[in-house]
Image (spheres, helix red, strand yellow):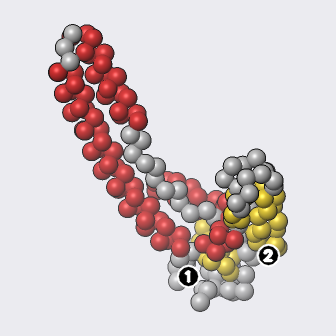
Amino acid sequence: MSGECPKCNLNDMVIKVSSIFTSGFSHTTAQSGPTLGVGLYKGKLGVGIGGGSSSSGISVSELSMRLKPPEKPKGLGCIIPFLVCFGGGFLLTIAVNDIVIPMILGAIGFIFWMVRLKLSRDKKMEIYDSLMAEWNSMYYCQRDDVVFIPGSVSIKSPESLQSYFNQKLS
Ligand SMILES: [Zn+2]
């Protein structure tokens, strides 16, 4: 049920964005040797050879990189607030020659920081989920090099799609 491209009003060159992205990846268990990636680009089948040094063993075709989904918000980054609060607590311990007050202040600061991080991450995950749903319903027209959602008149280039995702998640 691929919809028609809003630009050329045809659907013969239309592919689902998520399936282009998936076909652009070629997973391999081998840790060495070049990996092959096959992808569709402007109607042509392209083959890309990825460097064998990559430990992940994944190569990505050019088009699938241009159509990649939004990036998942990163983890809480626990180590930075942890280091700052305990580093600060440690310095304060030396300064006031007392361990109880700096430890309490450090713990309060740490908890406060984590709650703030969690709230902002929850909000980002919500945005991420809705962007993923959007991405999953997107189609790509190879003739016009545009991305669209069937039923919607708005079209995006793969590049503006990426900046749209980044802007929403920043
Ligand atoms: Zn088109």
Question: As shown in the figure, which amino acid type bears the numbered disc 1?
Answer: Pro
- Res 85 seen here: yes
**The N terminus lies in quadrant:** bottom right
Q: Quadrant of residue 143?
A: bottom right
Would you say 143 lies left or right of 89 here? right
Please name the residue shown 70% across and 60% down the image. Answer: 29
Q: Residue 150's mark?
A: 1
**Which numbered marker is on residue 167?**
none
- For disc 1, does the CB lie below 8 Å from ligand 1? no
Rendered location of residue 77, percent (x, y): 42, 41
Residue 94, above or below 15:
above
Percent x, y of residue 44: 82, 73
Point out the residue furthest to the bottom here: 1
Instruction: Classify 10 Å Cα crowding around label 1: few (below 14), some (14-19), many (20 and above).
Output: some
Residue 120, given in percent of the width and then of the height, sits at 34, 49
The residue labelled by disc 2 is 43
**Is residue 62 in view from this perspective?**
no
- In front here: 104 or 47? 104
Q: What SS does tag 2 mark?
A: loop
Q: Secondary structure at mark 1?
A: loop
Side of 142 where 33 appears, left or right = right
Figure quadrant of residue 161: bottom right
- Establish if 151 lies above or below 146: below
Mark 2: which amino acid?
A: Gly
Q: Residue at x 69, y 86 (%)?
A: 10
Q: Which of the two discs, 2 and 1, sits closer to the camera?
A: 2
Whole-percent x, y for residue 154 in the image: 55, 73
Residue drawn at 72 percent across, 86 percent down: 12
In depth, the one of 55 and 84 nearer the eye is: 55
